Amino acid sequence: MLNTLINLISRNKSVVLIKITLLCVSCLSVPPRSKTNTTPLSTTLLSVNGLVALWDFKEPSGQNRKANGTNEFQLRETHGTLPRLSEGPLSGYSALFEGKAFLSLPHKEIGRLNIHGEDQGITVVAWVKWSGEQTGFVGGMWNEYQDGGKRQYGLFVSLPYYNGEDQVCGHISLSGGPTPPFPYSIDYSASQQKVPVDEWCCIAFTYDGEFIRSYLNGAFKSRPSELIDHTSGFPDYPSGLTQTKNPYTYPDGIGNNGSDFTVGAVQLASGMGNYFIGQIGGLAVFDRALSNAEMRRLAKPLRNFNSAQ
């Protein structure tokens, strides 16, 4: 049988050679595999009711960061470029924030990201690897200076002035300005837990029209009432203000105040500031307050990701 096969190949060697050649060319033309941008976590996020936008930061430096599944909400690099690193829990990539560069979307293009209203809910979730340096703005519509302030909603890491040092902070504003009689806006929740340094974590806040809640890795932990720093000596507060920071009571609602949507920095009186230092691998905005169970579900895949690192 072997001799018969050899004779057959010998008689048809030109045909065999052509087939082998075509096969080799076909192999050479196959593009190299790239990282998929569809992970179990991304699939879960895209299925959650109320999702407005999800960015997974798979785009290389120099390109707009696009929300998944849509051409809306293209975040532009501003004041520099943001390197892409091959590490991240959603797409396998993340954007590195390490200087003055940040991402922005002009107010005229924010569309459904302009979440506001008296009883309007919101959730902002991010997957970050924070350096531990300074106050860091992660994402939202927050401008502390222009026209007296265009604050609306924003996710921060570490707001120490009013008892939020190294914690997940969720800011909401109706008026856009400072909280009377204080010089700054005091209206934010602050997680009981500290944000770990140089470790991937899921940070988030929700607002249901009455309470702002901060979450770390899907866990909400309440804080007792406490004296808020830097509040004594003001009218009606000679001894200072006592509040609960998580949840934070804020029944006023979300203002429609005209800010751009930014990631990684906010507008201050001195210019852009509160630069986030570290990596951002995902950012999601929902137009409702997610439940505690939903928050745990979104954070759960991160444990497997960190274990695999």
Image (tube, rainbow, N blue to C red):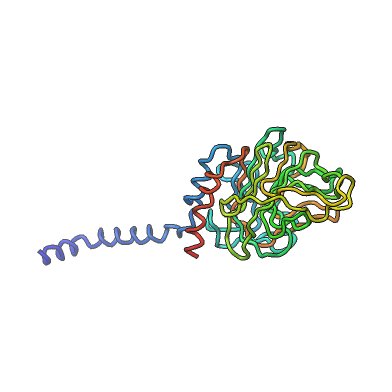
**Residue 100 visible, this orientation:** yes
Judge from the rendering whether residue 308 lies leftward or rightward of residue 173; answer left or right. left
Q: Residue at x 66, y 65 (%)?
A: 131
Q: Residue at x 72, y 47 (%)?
A: 171
Position in image of residue 285 (x %, y %): 62, 44
Q: Residue at x 53, y 40 (%)?
A: 48
Q: Closer to the camera, 154 or 2?
A: 154
**Residue 57 visible, this orientation:** no
Position in image of residue 104 (x %, y %): 71, 49
Q: Closer to the camera, 205 or 26?
A: 205
Position in image of residue 122 (x %, y %): 65, 40
Q: Closer to the camera, 281 or 248?
A: 248
Judge from the rendering whether residue 95 lies leftward or rightward of residue 150; answer left or right. left
Q: Closer to the camera, 2 or 118?
A: 118
Judge from the rendering whether residue 16 lies leftward or rightward of residue 235; answer left or right. left
Position in image of residue 84 (x %, y %): 61, 60
**Location of the N terminus (image quadrant):** bottom left
- Which residue is farthest front? 239
Where on the picture, by quarter, is residue 211? Answer: top right
- Which residue is farthest top? 118
Tally of numbered discs:
0
Judge from the rendering whether residue 156 lies leftward or rightward of residue 290; answer left or right. right
